[in-house]
Image (cartoon, rainbow, N blue to C red):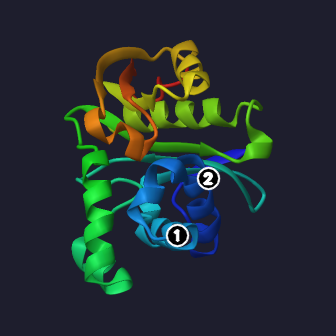
Amino acid sequence: MEITCGVTTAERARVGALYWEAFGAKLAPAFRDEATGRAEVTAALVADRVLVAREGEQVLGVCGFRAGGRGALHWTWRATRSRLGRLAALRAAAVLVPLHRADVRGVLVLDGLCVAAERRGAGTGSALLEAAADLAAGRGERAVQLSVVDTNPRAEALYRRLGFSVVAQGGTGPLADLYGFRRYRTLQRPVGGPGQGRR
């Protein structure tokens, strides 16, 4: 398995499908149907904000991250309106804006970890998180940060095993039924200097 930064044009559909499989339940209310949602996720991918795990030409999993004010998925009003029309773009914005994550100074904020179903439990997710720690260390950042929702205890258990600890938590309030989760936790893992991200 090899992990590098960047999604090729040929991989966009596969990566978009992985994101939709992982986060479609949360994103679905933004779009009129699954096909539209999957297409919008694929269109919104920022190729150089994604770590990609591959075997040969097969994409096994991806880990997005934020840098320079943009994450792995970046929607703009103009582009979304041009693809969906004004009313559908307003609906998408109303659902997506509350899910927005911001950059954190000195911290690499992860923007979605997705592993193909047939690769779960095989170490792909752990390898992507280690690659993210290496990336953070190489950029001179002090920590890696991610969020996990209360409906995904398996993922939280993995993050804790890899050295992440809770630094904040919050809730979705009246939007809980819309998004399908009520609470989320923000976790961080400190990293060392260049080349010291791996444990």
From the image, which quarter does the C terminus lie in?
A: top right
**Left or right: residue 191 compared with residue 159:** left
Task: Identify the image quadrant of residue 96.
Answer: bottom left
**Which sits in the foreground, 30 or 134?**
30
Q: Does residue 34 lie above or below 166 as drawn? A: below
Tell me if mark 2 has few (under 14), some (14-19) or many (20+) residues whose alpha carbon lies within 10 angstroms of its own. some
Q: Identity of the amino acid at label 1?
A: Asp
Tell me if mark 1 has few (under 14), some (14-19) or many (20+) residues whose alpha carbon lies within 10 angstroms of its own. few
Residue drawn at 33 percent across, 47 percent down: 66
Residue 75 visible here: no
Percent position (x, y) of residue 74? 34, 62
Q: Of the numbered discs in the image, which one, if any, rests on residue 64? A: none
Task: Identify the image quadrant of residue 122.
Answer: top right
Q: Secondary structure at mark 2?
A: helix
Q: Of the numbered discs in the image, which one, if any, rests on residue 21? A: 2
Instruction: Say which label, 2 or 1, has the lower sequence index.
Output: 2
**Left or right: residue 29 compared with residue 8:** left
**Which sits in the foreground, 151 or 22?**
151
Q: Nearer the viewer, mark 2 or mark 1?
A: 1
From the image, which quarter does the N terminus lie in?
A: top right
Residue drawn at 47 percent across, 44 percent down: 112
Q: Secondary structure at mark 1?
A: loop
In the image, farthest residue toward the left: 105
Q: Which residue is mark 1?
A: 33
Percent position (x, y) of residue 160? 52, 15
